[in-house]
Image (cartoon, helix red, strand yellow):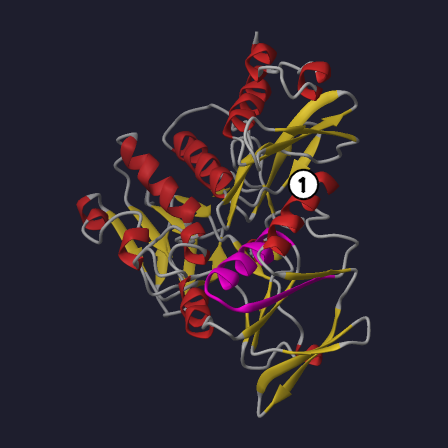
Amino acid sequence: MTDRLVIIGAGQAGFAMAAKLRALHDTRPITIIGAEDVLPYQRPPLSKKYLLGEMTFDRLLFRPEHWYPDNNVEIRLATFVEQIDRDKKEVALQDGSILDYGTLALTTGSTPRRLPAAVGGDLDGVYVARDKRDADLLADEMRPGRRVLIIGGGYIGLEAAAVARYRGLEVTVIEMADRILQRVAAKETADIIRAIHESHDVVIREKTGLKRLVGRDGHVCGAELSDGSVIEIDFAVVGIGVVPNDQLAKEAGLDVANGILVNEFARTSDTSIFAAGDCAVQPWQDGRIRLESVQNAVDQAEAAAAVIAGGDAPYDPKPWFWSDQYDVKLQIAGFNLGYDETLLRPGAREGAHSVWYFRNGQFIAVDAINDAKAYVTGKKLLETGINPDKAVLADAAADLKQLLA
């Protein structure tokens, strides 16, 4: 029997788990398996500074190549696991090799939803934004004066719109829901973000879906929209959400439900197998959630590493997120699931705002737009369990520090 840890997935969670184990002085052999042909790297800057040419790819790497052999971490790139044999504790790789494991970790992440071929999703010039290859393809397309259609008004789509405008493209965003950010943010936040994009000449069409993309010689050239209009475009970016990569776990007989089910220690229904990051569905308050964020991927993977190394501390998620669009920084503390009340507060300087979320009178999250003080205060309130005085929040002249007293 081996004590090897095999980590399937070379993204943020997979690397964080390996690095944490070494930081804890755990010396077991580790093998990381990654489908891409490059070393593990940060993904958020791909769609921002890397795509804008402000950051070279080598600066995105978590560690240089020598870190892996120096720390007894084997990394296998450009391959993937085809099957998990839980009885034999083996994984079969696409390249034909077999690896045995003592502990297995699934950090398989998620995959962007794509448009079906029936509506033109198979045309050239239709992209998603997820990995280095996607960013490289988009960089070639983003030239001044070209026309791009962004399908989906969530954070992914809006960040792509901001980069495209920065590079001088004509940008149209369509969102089939009543408004942008409908699934993830309150109307107040959406109104502020919409106004920012419109001030940069982005055309946002809400309550407007895609009927089909139109092609010429196999390349997208236009789009028929649900309102009957037709627009000419040079390429399209699809930002309509992601799906967890849980198929491998499902085929191995693990419990899955829109992600791999884990307990508070990041263990799956097989005690020798852990899961962390976008692919994992974890306990949250009285239910379960799947968090799609870098913060959760790192924190959950590190918590799992501590358990693998012999610890017994449960993972208690403290969600936070961020989105950079133009010179606007949106910082989010908490998770607004099930909110029934919001409070909009202007910040101390021009362009600063915060939106505070409540559920049954209890503070659960804050969106801070160019307002670091509101973000930091909200985060501390959530960590300490203090319920803020709404009268103080509603008073723009009041100092937020008194909420923590």
- Residue 55 in percent (x, y) is at 32, 55
- Figure check: 336 above or below 61: above
- Residue 155 in percent (x, y) is at 59, 51
Left or right, 87 with respect to 3, comes to: right
Span of residues in magenta: 154-175
- Residue 342 in percent (x, y) is at 74, 30
Left or right, 328 with respect to 242, comes to: left
Q: Residue drawn 38% across and 50% down?
A: 42
- 93 or 36: which is nearer to us? 36
Q: Residue drawn 58% across and 18% down?
A: 381
Q: Residue 398's quadrant in the figure?
A: top right
- 194 or 313: which is nearer to us? 194
The amino acid beneath tag 1 is: Thr
Q: Residue 117's quadrant in the figure?
A: bottom right
- Residue 134 in percent (x, y) is at 46, 67
Q: Residue 346's quadrant in the figure?
A: top right
Q: Is residue 48 visible?
A: yes
Q: Which residue is mark 1?
A: 189
Q: Residue drawn 52% across and 29% down?
A: 315
Residue situated furthest right in the rendering: 227
Residue situated furthest bottom in the rendering: 217
Q: Is residue 256 visible?
A: no
Say few, some or many: other residues with alpha carbon within 10 Å of mark 1 (under 14 / 14 to 19 / 20 or more).
many
